[in-house]
Amino acid sequence: MLAGNHRHHRRGVVSLGFDPVFFSSAIPRYNPLMDSARIQELCQLGQNELMRMEYLAAEHTLAEAEELAWENRDFDSLARLYMPLQEARRQRRQRCMEGRIQIDIPPAGPRDRASGLRAAECLGHGELLIAGWGTIQPALDARRMAADAGIYVDVFLAAVYPAEAGRIVAIIPTGDITLPPAQAMPIDLLIRRLPAHSIVISDSELAKLSNPAAIMALWEQLHAPFLAAANATVAPIQKIAAYRRTIEVDYACELAHQNLSDTARKLCVKAAG
């Protein structure tokens, strides 16, 4: 169980024990006393769900606690909750990897549309790479369906493009992007127009993604540049934000969770000193 933080009001501002200039971004946006109690409640609930091996529920609960603790710059709670959150996500990934690997790429052209909702529902348990022509919408739909249904399905965000020979599949790190249209173009031009750190795979290479080791390597390749950028960040608040961005790319990146916990703990020590 996470230990609660003791905070007090002074001149209408909540004191977090940090230097007010250096930690200007640490001023919470909500009622910190109520939020602190809610964070502890969520953490206890998440721990109980984790012990019952309810991994999807535990992840959802602990992620809510993490979001609330981050908004309040509650670094003590953050330092403590990242490790159980990592465990819930590690178990989620492991269970997804125990299922089937499905690659769903529409063969004909832009008029041939993939259904992310149907693909995730039919798979039910496993790893899904689904792409639309010049769009990641089918993959976003599949992710939403998997989350709503509470099933162990991982979904890569991917879009497909015509190529001189066959098709090119672009795996995209995050969903908050704009993609080029599904038009034939030289591969080097397509790579330049895709979001940074996208992974481009040819038709012939898709067949290599038929085993769990290849899927794990693809997730690691996807999050690697974001993890490296976070490791290179010096300012602690920005460093935490960068690691959280890494987890947006790959929720199961264990090093990001471990380094988040360590960075938050160092901020607690700095505040106490």
Image (tube, rainbow, N blue to C red):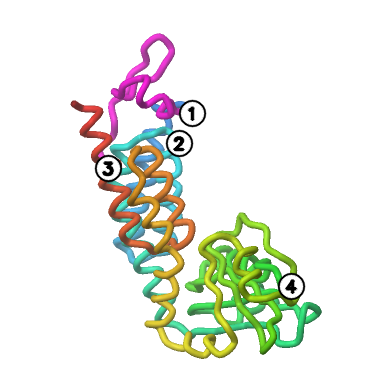
Residue type, mark 1 in image? Tyr
Residue 216: quarter of image: bottom left
- In the picture of the structure, the residue carrying the numbered disc 4 is 182
Tell me which segment is drawn in magenta.
Answer: 1-28
Q: Residues within 10 Å of mark 4 (few under 14, many from 20)?
A: some
Residue at (37, 42) in percent of width and height: 41
Mark pair 1, 3: CA separation? 20 Å
| Residue 34 shown left or right of residue 264 in the figure | right
Mark 1 or 2: in front is 2
Looking at the image, residue 110 lies above or below residue 265: below
Residue at numbered disc 3: 2
Q: Is residue 65 visible?
A: no
Location of mark 2 (residue): 71
Residue lying at the far left of the rendered structure: 273
* x then y, percent, for residue 208: 47, 88
| Mark seen at residue 30 | 1
Query: Left or right of 101: which side holds 195?
Result: right
User: What is the three-letter code of the residue carrying label 2?
Assistant: Glu
In front: mark 2 or mark 3? 2
Q: Confirm whether the magenta stretch covers residue 140.
A: no
Q: Quadrant of the C terminus?
A: top left
Q: Nearer the viewer, mark 4 or mark 3?
A: 4
Q: How far is the residue under mark 4 from the one under mark 3?
A: 49 Å
Percent across and percent down for residue 68 are 44, 40
Q: CA distance from mark 2 to mark 4?
A: 39 Å
Q: Quadrant of residue 182?
A: bottom right
Say whether disc 1 or disc 3 marks the residue closer to the N-terminus. Answer: 3
Residue 59, given in percent of the width and then of the height, sits at: 41, 58
- CA–CA distance in space, label 4 to label 1: 44 Å
